[in-house]
Amino acid sequence: MASHWPVIVGINQYQSLQPLMYAQFDALELRDFLVAEVGLPAQYCSLLTDISAVVYEGAAAPTREVLLQRLAQSCDRAGPEDTVWFFFSGYGVQWQGKDYLLPIDADPNRIEQTGILVETLLNQLAQGNQRQSIVMLDMNRPQSALSPAPGGCNLGDQTLALAKSLGIPLVLSCQPNQFSQETLAVRHGLFTEALIEGMRFHGCLTLAQLVDYLRDRVPELCQHHWRPAQNPVAAVPPGQQYAMLVPPSLVGQMPVGVMPPPELLPAPQPEPDISLPGEPSPIWPIYPAPVSVAPPTDEVTQPWPPTKPVELELPPGVLPEVTKPSAPSQSVPGLVPWQRWGILAAGLLLLGVLWRNQDSFVGGGSAPDAAPEVTAPSAVPSPVETAAGEVDPAAETVGEPLFPGTAASGAEALARARTALDQRQFGEALSWLTQIPEGERPEDYEALINQAETGYANAELSGAAALNQARRLIEPVSASLFNDAIEQARQVPAGDPAYEQAQADIERWSLVILDLAEGRAAAGDLDGAISAARLVPQDQGETWGQAQARIQTWEQSRVNRQLLQEAQSLLQPDQAASFQAAIAIAQQIPPDYPESAIAQERIDQWSRDILAIARARAASGQIPGAISAAGLVPPGTSAYEQAQQEISEWQGQ
C-alpha cells in the first residue's frame, strides 16, 4: 500500500545567523497536521527543528549532517509506490551561481562547506527508491540578496531549472525576485498558512489542486495582513499534477471543515515597509501551465514601493549578514461576538446584584453575618380601615389573590394550595390558602398555614442566595453552566421578591445559550453547537423555536460534511470514474448551506481533473480512453464545454 515519507525542516535559531520568527512553527504545525489530523504514522515523518528533539520523540536538530542523513533514510525506506515529501522553511542563499539551503549549523563564511546544495538534495531525491517526490521550499533571504547574481539569476532560478530537468515537482513560496512574508497575526509564514489551510479546509489532495489554491490564497493573505506581494511559483512536470499530497488510503480521514467567517479572522494591521525602491519584476509562470496571478492593486500595494535590483558584491568566502525583518507586535485579536455576549451578560448580572444590595455597600445595610429580618404574610390579612376609622368586615376573610384578575372557589383554592405545597412552592401555597373563605377551611388549615409560612420564610432567606448562586455559575462561558443557572433560578418560588428577576434571567440566559451555540457553529464545532442549542428550555417559546431551526440547519451541515468526506475518499489518481463518482456525491449537498460553496468549488476542480486525465491519455496515444474519460465531465461544470470540444477533435483523428 502506497505511503508518504515527509522530511519536514523548520529552523529559527541559527548558530551563526540572525534568528527567524516562524520557520519552526511552520514545520511543527505541518507535522502535527499530517500525523494528528490526516493519520500518517509518526514514524514515517522526519521532523527537524531547533527544539523538536525536546518536544517530539525521535526528532532531531537540523544540522547539515543530520538533514542529509534523514533525507537519505526516507528515500531508502520508501517503497516503489511511495512518495517522499521534502518541506524546508529557513534560510537560502545563492553562492557563485548555485542555490544553497542553510542548515542550523551553517557558517556564512563557508557556504560551500556548510550549506546544502539544492542540486545535491534534488539528485538524492531523483535517485531514491520512491515512485514520486514533492519538494516545497520556503527560502528566506537577506533583502540585499534580491540583486541577481552573475548571469542575471536570483535565488530560486537554478532550483526551478534543476527540478524541471530532473522531473521533480517543486513549489517555491515566492518568485525569485520576491520575499517570503510572515505575520504575527497567524504566527506562520503566509505560504505555510495557505498550504495547511488548503489541505485542512478546501480538500486539496493533489499537487495541482494545492498549486491552484496557493496561487490565489497567498496574495490574498498578503493583502489581508498588509504585506508586500508574494506569488508562489511551481515547476510541475507533465503527468505529475496528480501527485497525491497524502496517501490514498488516508484520504477518507482528511479533515473537512469550513473556513471561519471574516469577522473571526485577525484584522489586518499595517506593517513596516520592507521593500526596496524600483520597478516590479515580471511574474514567473508555473511549468507547464501558468498559475501566478497579477499582483495586488495599486491601492493595496502603494505603501511598499516596487522592488528594484541592486548590485550585490560578495568578497570571496564572505556572505553579508543575513536578516529577516520581524513582524511588529500586534494586539491580540478581539473576542468573537458570542464571547462578548457572554461577558456582557455576566456584567449585567453583576450590576443587578450591586443595585439590589446597594444599601450594604453604602453602610445602610445589616452586618454581613446578620441574617435579614423575615416577615412572612399572615394567614388572614389585617383588617382594612374605612375613612371613618371603622373596620371593613369584608376585608377580614378575603386574601390578596396571587394572580390579580383570577378568582377561585374555596375547594379549588385548597386543591391548588395543596399542589403548591407538594411542589415546595410555598409563596404560591400561602396565596391560595388566604383566598379560602373561613367557612370552607379544612380541619388541617392551621397546619397547612404553618407549613407554608415556615417554608416561605426559609425560601425567602434562600431565594436571593439561590439566584446569586445561579449567576455565579455562568462566570465561565459555558452553555451547560447557563443551563445549570436556569435550573437553579427555577427554584425561586412564585411570589418571592426575586421571582420576576429570576424569570427575566432565565429568558436572558436562554438567549445567551443560543448565542453560544451560534459561536460554536461559526468556529466549525457543529456537534458542540447542536449540544448547546438543545439546552434552550422548551418553555422559552420564540428562543426555543429559533434553537430548533438552527439545530436542523446544523444537523444538515453535519450530513453535508460527511458527504464531502465520502466524496474525497473515492478519489483515485488517473481514474476519471472516481472523480465522476465524487462529483455525484457532492451534488447531493443542498444549496444555501456553507458546504454548498465548497462542494461547487470541488465539483469544478474535479471536472477539470477529469479533463486533464483525458488529455494525458490522448497525449500518450490512448484516444478511446481519452474520449471515454472526457465524456465523464458533467454538464454545467466549468470544463464541460471544453471537454465536448476536445471529444469532437479526438473523434476526428
Image (spheres, rainbow, N blue to C red):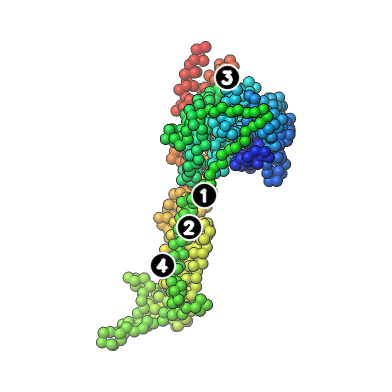
Crowd around label 4: few <14 · some 14–19 · many ≥20 (10 Å)? some
Q: Please tell me which of labels 3 and 4 falls first in the chain.
A: 4
Could you classify mark 1 by the number of other residues whose Cα lies within 10 Å: few (under 14), some (14-19), or many (20 or more)? few
Q: Residue 39, percent across and down?
A: 64, 40
Q: CB atoms at circles 2 and 4 under 8 Å apart?
A: no
Residue drawn at 54 percent across, 20 percent down: 615
Horizontally, is 425 left or right of 81 in the view?
Answer: left
Q: Label 3 vs label 2: CA separation?
A: 61 Å
User: Does residue 187 appear left or right of residue 133 in this picture?
Assistant: left
C-alpha separation, residue under disc 3 versus residue under disc 1: 52 Å
Mark drawn on residue 500: 4
The residue that mark 3 highlights is: 617
Residue type for callout 4? Glu
* Left or right relative to 206: residue 77: right
Choose mark 2 or mark 4, whichever is in front.
2
- Label 1: state its secondary structure: loop
Cα distance in 3D space between marks 4 and 1: 40 Å
Secondary structure type for disc 2: helix
Pointer 1 residue: 332
Image mark for residue 343:
2
Residue type at the position of mark 1: Val
User: How many residues crowd mark 2 within 10 Å: few (<14), some (14–19), many (20+)?
Assistant: some
**Residue type indicated by callout 3:** Arg
